[in-house]
Image (cartoon, rainbow, N blue to C red):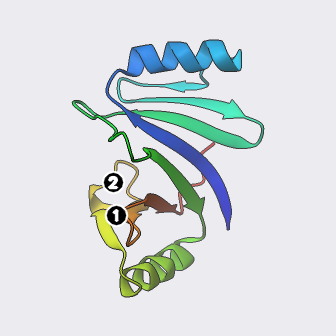
């Protein structure tokens, strides 16, 4: 298993993208109307547009993405659910069809993926 991506949920993608591009000193290597992604070392750092999203003052909005083989992803999903996690986005509803998003019992979201895209 490896952490492949960490992303922030944001409402203003253009503003956030300009901020991070300037701060990091690199242009995004992926861009779409809903997603901007930078390579930082060996990690993907992304920005996900979510209309109307506002991070609560006492909460974080980062989501680590754990990349594993498909069989391991499914096993970890079931294990997380058995441990009290909540399913946020299931495989058929995820844009890449190979990932699911869960929230741990404290509400922290994380993604399990078998998608190996850069």
Residue 27 seen in this snapshot: no
Q: Is residue 85 above or below residue 59?
A: below
State the image coordinates of residue 28 (x, y, percent, origin top left).
59, 22
Which residue does the image show at 39% across and 46% down from the upper left?
Answer: 58
Which residue does the image show at 54% across and 27% down from the upper left?
Answer: 30
Label 1 environment density (alpha carbons within 10 Å; few <14, some 14–19, many ≥20): some
Which residue does the image show at 54% across and 15% down from the upper left?
Answer: 19
State the image coordinates of residue 100 (x, y, percent, origin top left).
39, 62
Q: Is disc 2 placed on a helix, strand or loop?
A: loop
Task: Identify the residue position indicated by label 2 in the image.
Answer: 94
Q: In which quarter of the image is residue 48?
A: top left
Q: Is residue 107 above or below residue 55?
A: below
State the image coordinates of residue 56 (x, y, percent, origin top left).
32, 41
Quadrant location of the N terminus in the rendered image? bottom right
Residues marked 2 and 1 touching at CB (< 8 Å) = yes
State the image coordinates of residue 9 (x, y, percent, origin top left).
39, 38
Residue 68 seen in this snapshot: yes
Which residue does the image show at 53% across and 79% down from the upper left?
Answer: 71
Task: Identify the residue position indicated by label 1 in the image.
Answer: 91
Q: In which quarter of the image is residue 37?
A: top right
Q: Is residue 11 above or below residue 102?
A: above
Name the foreground residue: 117 vs 101: 101
Q: Is disc 1 placed on a helix, strand or loop?
A: helix
Q: In this view, does 47 lie above or below 64?
A: above
Whole-number angstrom distance, CA of label 2 to CA of label 1: 5 Å
Label 2 environment density (alpha carbons within 10 Å; few <14, some 14–19, many ≥20): few
Quadrant location of the C terminus in the rendered image? top right
Return the residue found at the far left.
Answer: 52
Name the foreground residue: 61 vs 32: 61
Q: In the image, is 39 to the left or to the right of 70?
A: right
Q: Which mark is residue 4?
A: none
Q: In the image, is 93 to the left or to the right of 45?
A: left
């Amino acid at each position: 298993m490896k952490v492949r991506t960490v992303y922030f949920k944001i409402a203003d993608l253009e503003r956030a993208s300009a901020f991070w591009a300037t701060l990091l000193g690199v242009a995004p290597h992926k861009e779409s109307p809903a997603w901007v992604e930078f390579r930082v070392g060996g990690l993907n750092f992304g920005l996900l547009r979510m209309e109307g999203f506002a991070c609560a003052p006492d909460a974080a909005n980062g989501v680590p993405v754990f990349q594993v083989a498909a069989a391991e992803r499914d096993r970890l999903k079931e294990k997380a659910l058995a441990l009290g996690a909540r399913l946020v986005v299931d495989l058929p509803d995820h844009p890449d069809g190979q990932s699911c998003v869960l929230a741990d019992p404290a509400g922290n979201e994380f993604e399990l993926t078998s998608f190996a895209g850069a």
